[in-house]
């Protein structure tokens, strides 16, 4: 079984309008959400073989905050995640080494929402509905698949969980 985790970066700051989009940092709310996701990851024992992080500052900061809560094999910055479509993200997943069982991508919408919605063919009805409705900043979707990475396609995934920062504040 393979597992794909998709962590959308936490809420970014728009305080400095002169910054290029790629360079925007996390907002205070985003820092709190990333810390909550770190605690959630630690509490659930999240383990991943490979982490691919967008080169955007807000994605890097999200990962830096969440990382202490995750047991990780390898981490790589993957510039192609920034601005990637669902098709381009799926291409990255297809390229994961078959010796690995799990991958975590840290990146952006709309690509993450489109990819997760496309791949999720089964799972808890409430979680599927929430995922398809909106993929908020800081949210983490976890999907499992049978077969090799290269065979993953539309509807093949089982949504194991969809956790939003607001779910952790309750």
Image (cartoon, rainbow, N blue to C red):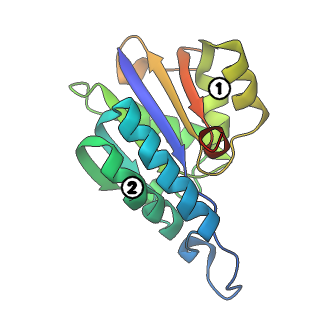
Left or right: residue 52 versus residue 74 is right
Q: Residue at x 50, y 28 (%)?
A: 142
Left or right: residue 131 versus residue 123 is right
* Category of crowding for the residue at label 1, using alpha-carbon neighbours closer than 10 angstroms: few (below 14), some (14–19), many (at least 20): some
| Residue topped by disc 2 | 78
Q: Earlier in the sequence, mark 2 or mark 1?
A: 2
Q: Are marks 2 and 1 in contact (CB under 8 Å)?
A: no
User: Marks 2 and 1, how far apart in space?
Assistant: 22 Å
Could you tell me residue 154's position as x and y percent? 60, 20
Q: Is 77 placed above or below 167 here?
A: below
Quarter of the figure with the N terminus? top left
Snapshot quadrant of residue 140: top right
The answer to which of 143 and 44 lies nearer the viewer is 44
The answer to which of 161 and 49 lies nearer the viewer is 161
Could you tell me residue 114's position as x and y percent? 67, 36
Mark linked to residue 118: 1
Q: Residue at x 63, y 63 (%)?
A: 29
Q: Residue at x 61, y 45 (%)?
A: 165
The answer to which of 152 and 69 lies nearer the viewer is 69
Could you tell me residue 12's position as x and y percent? 63, 67
Mark linked to residue 127: none
Find the residue positioned furthest to the right. 133
Left or right: residue 99 versus residue 124 is left
> For numbered disc 2, what is the local secondary structure?
loop
Quarter of the figure with the C terminus? top right
Q: Residue at x 43, y 63 (%)?
A: 60
């Amino acid at each position: 079984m393979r597992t794909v985790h998709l962590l959308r970066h936490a809420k970014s700051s728009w305080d400095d309008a002169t910054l290029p989009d790629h360079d925007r940092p996390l907002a205070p709310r985003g820092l709190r959400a990333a810390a909550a996701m770190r605690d959630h990851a630690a509490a659930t024992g999240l383990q991943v073989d490979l982490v691919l992080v967008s080169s955007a500052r807000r994605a890097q900061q999200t990962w830096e905050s969440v990382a202490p809560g995750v047991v990780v094999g390898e981490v790589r910055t993957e510039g192609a995640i920034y601005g990637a479509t669902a098709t381009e993200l799926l291409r990255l997943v297809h390229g994961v080494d078959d010796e690995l069982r799990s991958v975590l991508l840290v990146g952006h919408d709309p690509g993450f929402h489109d990819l997760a919605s496309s791949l999720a063919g089964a799972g808890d009805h409430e979680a599927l509905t929430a995922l398809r409705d909106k993929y908020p900043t800081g949210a983490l979707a976890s999907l499992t698949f049978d077969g090799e990475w290269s065979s993953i396609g539309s509807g093949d995934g089982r949504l194991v969980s969809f956790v939003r920062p607001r779910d952790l504040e309750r």
